[in-house]
Amino acid sequence: MAIAFESLYSDIAGRCGKLTVGKKTVKTPALLPVINPHLQLVTPKEMQAMGVEALITNAYIFSQSRQFRERALTEGLHKVLDFDGVIMTDSGSFQLSVYGEVSITNTETLSFQRDIGSDIWVPLDIPTSPAADRETTERELAITLQRLAEAKEVFGPDAPIAGPVQGGTFGDLRELSARKVTELGFTFCPVGAVVPLMESYRYRDLVKVVMASKRELSPSACVHLFGAGHPSMFALATAMGCDLFDSAAYALYAKDGRYLTAHGSYRIEELADLPCACSVCRSHTAEELRAAPDRERLLALHNLYVTLAEISRVRQAIVDGTLWELVDERCRGHPRLLDGYRELLTHAPALAAHDRVSKRRFFYRGDESCQRTEVLRYQQQLARLRLGKNVLVVIDGKVQGGYDDTLFFRPPFGPYPAELRETFPIGPCETPDWDAAMVHQGCRGIRALAESHPKSRIVIAAGPAWAGLIREELAEMETVDDEV
Ligand code: GUN
Ligand code: ZN
């Protein structure tokens, strides 16, 4: 019954993979829609027809429900919800974070989740508020870890139990938490208590928290980002190595009259037209959608379609090796997402270790592209070039004689030998006309080359367009005027 995860394609630290729970499998990245048994705007059966392979529901609601408790225990969760895919159950920790207490213990909720036939069980972890001080965060983390140890002891090493990572906004506590969860043998690891960060658009902090957690989780662990459901952040979260998302956003936004898109959301009153290809939007005008008696359900359907389509887009970007371009595009939808993206780029050294060697293309999309993993990695690998004593780097002019080796220049990467002209990243790199940021980054490549080849004399030949900038950037290096 153990939970297994296999990565099939990867890009940055993101993976397209296969989650196996018992006999069932789920393609990842995946969105698990949140089902409230009392309020089903879209039924699990309809979701299955839309391609949903897994969903999440709250075991605490079932355990407290006069209507559903006994049925779930006798007929099982899959029958009650009429869904034969993977069903994950949450414990009541969410209620704990909202109401401060719940009338159930850790082993009680886990036993209940087992008894209703849930596929993935969640212990009663404590989602520590990001506002909590260090002492509180440490104390609550200790309780969470003790409950995770108890879960393994009582239900055995192979029970399908999730091991949530807590630790608030303290990077070292997130690392500690992830390390302990890994030591305890959990292979399915949600990153918890991030909902308040996402609700207040603190994407920079979100990136710090997830990156700290990922540092200490096993690469083979399936990572779930608890409560993440806005499609505009799937690319960013996937790039960090998050494999699963769950969300009530499609329904909560619908109740609130809000229309999701991958770039952000609209109030339904604001829409003059419906910018979407789903069946709801193609069969209604904005006016009709606003006035429809079942508007909440129609909005929920649209929101779900958009969310699932974005998951598909992220999967395709991973297969293509174009996830950075998608992250760049999505993170320009909101300035605080851009903060998150910029924070992610500061982690390029850690991400480069996971990133794949070759991709379909490299599209330059502005200054941020200079900090991408491919650039960093290319510049690190320049140390491997074997060079003679006298080396000419031709920036944008003509080749000159009298050198042992001649290299060319492709910003933002830097110098390259003719043999690499067609290979990734030099060949499939598409840039607009050179700008100062990319030339500046390319100069770093030249400096990296010089530093890793102290025995070579490196001379730079630049044409008039870039000679000034190059001389400024590489003041310590020898240049020759290019005869044009
Ligand atoms: N739902 C959203 N965040 C959390 C969390 O940290 N733990 C649990 N169990 N459920 C959540
Ligand atoms: Zn639509």
Image (cartoon, helix red, strand yellow):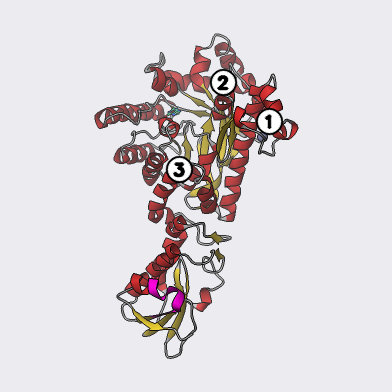
The answer to whether 223 is drawn above or below residue 102 in the figure is: below
Judging depth in this view, the residue of 194 and 86 nearest the camera is 194
Disc 2 marks a residue whose amino acid type is Asn
Residue 469 lies, in percent from the top left, at: 39, 71
Q: Which residues are magenta?
A: 460-469
Q: Residue furthest right?
A: 283
Give the mark nearer the N terminus: 1 vs 2: 2
Using the image as rendered, state which of residue 365 and residue 185 is in the foreground. Answer: 365
In the picture, measured across the screen, residue 205 lies left or right of residue 48, that is left
Drawn side of residue 468 relative to residue 234, left or right: left
Q: Residue furthest bottom?
A: 402
Residue 432 falls within the magenta-colored stretch? no
Seen at 40% across and 16% down, the residue is 102
Q: Amino acid at mark 1?
A: Ala
Q: Position of residue 227 (x, y in %)?
A: 48, 31
| Dominant secondary structure (helix, strand or loop) of the stretch shown in magenta | helix
Per the model, the C-alpha gap separating discs 3 and 1 is 27 Å
Residue at the outermost left position: 135
In the rendered image, residue 175, in percent from the top left (x then y), is placed at 33, 41
Give the residue number, with chain letter if any, for mark 1: 286
Specify the quarter for ligand 2.
Answer: top right
Of the pair 394 and 345, the residue shown nearer to us: 394
Q: Residues within 10 Å of mark 2 (few under 14, many from 20)?
A: some
Q: Is residue 388 visible?
A: no
- For the residue labelled by badge 3, is the local secondary structure a helix, a strand or a loop? helix
Q: Quadrant of residue 216?
A: top left
Q: Is residue 444 left or right of residue 122?
A: left
Q: Of discs 2 and 3, which sits in the foreground?
A: 3
Residue 30 position within the rendered picture, expressed as x and y whole percent measured from the top left = 57, 38
The residue wearing badge 3 is: 335
Label 3 with label 1: CB-CB less than 8 Å? no
